[in-house]
Amino acid sequence: MASPRFAFLNGSIVPWDQAQVHIASVGFRFGTGVFEGIRAYWNEDQQQLHVWQLAEHLQRLIYSQRFMRFERIFQPDYVAEQLIALLQANEFRETLHIMATSFISGPGLPQALGPVDLAIAASPSKRPQSRTQGCRVQVSAWQRVADAAMPMRVKCNANYQNGRLASVQALADGYDTALMLNSRGKVAEGPGMCFFLFRDGQAITPTVTNDILESITRRTVITLLQEHLEVPVVERDIDRSELVAAEEAFFCGTAWEVTPVVEIDRLPVGEGVPGPRVMALQGLFLDLAEGRSELYPAWRTPVYGD
Ligand code: PMP
């Protein structure tokens, strides 16, 4: 696939190939960066590209930057303006995945607080087959890092090495992805997505104090389940042994959207096919994200026109 034409780095829109970072930078050496993965959805009928839940992502980016004590904090208005300008410059007319990263761009020690730079890269993103067919999951032998060690609540680049261990092992063992337990042995999340199961008419998901990212999609899904699908949602610890009792299950996140989980540790979840409640939720979610539903207009930021 051809590269996009432009990226954003160091205050300006630059040709894609010139968006480069020095090998001596603290961001490169130690993973000292925080980021947001964001989606923009193309609506062919409206000839419009909508950035999905931009304000929510940029608010979380503020939290991550402050947590890292970066000496420069990129504010939501500034990042939003640059991000929209970048999408316009590329004249994208397709669904995208966007990464906005605030990172230490100069040389230094791991404890450096600056200089801080902002990078934005957007590229076309196709929906994988797992969205409709579901995914087969391995409960990972790798533990989710604990909040007191390396908080997953902070969307720091370096955190993603923990999920990588789980993903690589799951793929090597013939699964599609992993589900991670925390240091207490309770269900936490997937490498880059949150987890829900259905049991006895309820949707159950780990609380945000189970060593997970405070996911925007998780919050959205809770609203949609409660207010539109009339499914009560319970946030509580989930034991590993409960996975076998799940009638349906799914992962959710910006990249994963709403993805059915059809098998865990080679045991089918429910009937072993995407369940009706998960697929109804997925349909509702995509209608909103792709701009076919007019509900929650604040969640969609149009890129073109006024
Ligand atoms: N957990 C982790 C570790 C993630 O990286 C992500 C993706 N950002 C999620 C959960 C889902 O979060 P969100 O819905 O905000 O994309």
Image: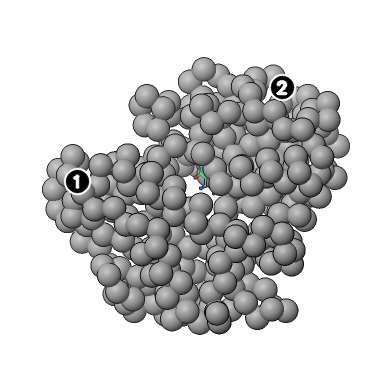
Quarter of the image where one finds residue 193: top right
Secondary structure at badge 2 equals helix
> How far apart, in angstroms, are the residues tagged by discs 2 and 1?
43 Å
**Colour scheme used in the picture?**
one colour
Q: Is residue 216 at least partly visible in the picture?
A: yes
Nearer to us in this view, 277 or 171: 277
Nearest to the observer: residue 225 or residue 273: 225
Q: Quadrant of the C terminus?
A: bottom right
**Residue type, mark 1 in image:** Leu
Please give the name of the residue rendered at 50% of the width and 82% of the height, measured from the top-left corner.
91
- Residue 243 screen position, x and y as percent: 71, 26
Which class describes the residues within 10 Å of circle 2: few (<14), some (14-19), or many (20+)?
few
At x 76% / y 54%, what residue is drawn?
284
Q: Kindly indicate the quadrant of the structure image that contains residue 80.
A: bottom left
Please, what secondary structure does the residue beneath circle 1 have?
loop
Q: Which residue is mark 1?
A: 113
Amino acid type, label 2 = Glu
Foreground residue among 204 and 165: 204
Q: Is residue 21 above or below residue 243?
A: below
Disc on res. 242: 2
Where is residue 74? Give x, y as percent. Answer: 32, 57
Residue 286 visible, this angle: no
Pointer 2 residue Cβ closer than 8 Å to ligand 1: no
| Few, some or many residues within 10 Å of mark 1 (<14, 14–19, 20+) | some
Residue located 81% across and 44% down the image:
229
Residue 247 image offset from top left, x and y in percent:
81, 32
Q: Is the residue 81 above or below the residue 282 in the image?
A: below
Task: Confirm or deny contact between disc 2 and disc 1 (CB under 8 A).
Answer: no
Q: Relative to 170, is 281 on the left or the right? A: right
Q: Earlier in the sequence, mark 2 or mark 1?
A: 1
- Residue at position x 40%, y 40% from top? 154
